[in-house]
Amino acid sequence: MAADNPKGKKPTWVIDKERARRAAAAETVWLFGLHAVRDALANPAREKQRLVVTRNALARLGDLHGIEPEITDPRVFDKSVPLAGESVHQGAALEVKPLKWGSLSEVALREAPGEGRPLLVALDRVTDPHNIGAILRSAEVFGARAVIAPARHSAPETGALAKTASGALERQPYLRVPNLAEALNQLKLMGFILIGLDGTGETELPDVLEKLPGRAICLVMGAEGPGMRELTMKTCDHVARIPFAADFGSLNVSNAAAVALYAANRA
């Protein structure tokens, strides 16, 4: 019986996989707003494709770092740029490639500026780009080495995320991994202590941190409502809660991350 494919010809599934890989590599992101665009332009690691601006925005952007702008009329800006109508763009949009931060070990073990313990944040099923943007800002302020999230169940780089991050997306590693549980286990092997934050935790976060002076910490957080998945929580070395003055529910995940990062940085 004849073979399904002529000798030397790639199977269809191989061809489809290669096409998907090329398509993924060609994906770009549109960043909106003066602050996000200005910071991305200044980032030498960011691969820029197109800069679309109004004349007013161009005058306010400053140094374009060698990229040639496409000047458009404010009245047709939303038609010139995909998704512009859904964002507060301030007349500035930049098409870029997603940043490449390297492997988990490269990011987790890199030297962070300033003093303090090695600190990471891992997010489980946090899909709101505004929350992740705010968490990236807090992570940068309190010296975290990276924010880690699963590739399939987290917000990708978007204009909304970049705008909320207010420039932190360009400086704070945001690493999306294929499997969060596997990544957490790898961090354990690197010497990180995993502290899951959940309202059911029997111990308060400051008490856990007090017993781990100088140790490398990864704060693990889940989305509001569902929280961490069971496997994620089981992977943690400790499950702690943020102490509240009253029983009023829980903090927004970005607010909880800011509080936890501050506590871990100061402990």
Image (spheres, grey):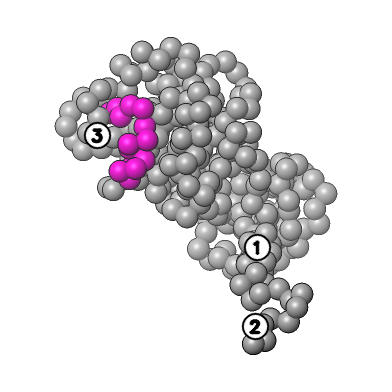
Q: Residue at x 64, y 51 (%)?
A: 98
Q: Which of disc 2 and disc 3 is earlier in sequence?
A: 2
From the viewer's side, name the closer residue of 79 and 216: 216
Q: Which of disc 3 and disc 1 is earlier in sequence?
A: 1
Q: Residue at x 48, y 13 (%)?
A: 214
Q: Position of residue 254 (x, y in %)?
A: 40, 39
Total number of numbered discs in the rendering: 3
Q: Which residue is mark 1?
A: 21
Q: Which residue is mark 2?
A: 4
Q: Using residue 83 as the reference point, say whether residue 45 is left or right of it.
A: right
The question of residue 78 being in magenta is answered with: no
Q: Which residues are magenta?
A: 228-241
Quadrant where the N terminus sits is: bottom right
From the viewer's side, name the closer residue of 215 and 13: 13
Label 1 secondary element: helix
Q: Position of residue 181 (x, y in %)?
A: 43, 42
Q: Amino acid at mark 1?
A: Arg
Q: Position of residue 102 (x, y in %)?
A: 65, 40
Q: Residue at x 74, y 58 (%)?
A: 49
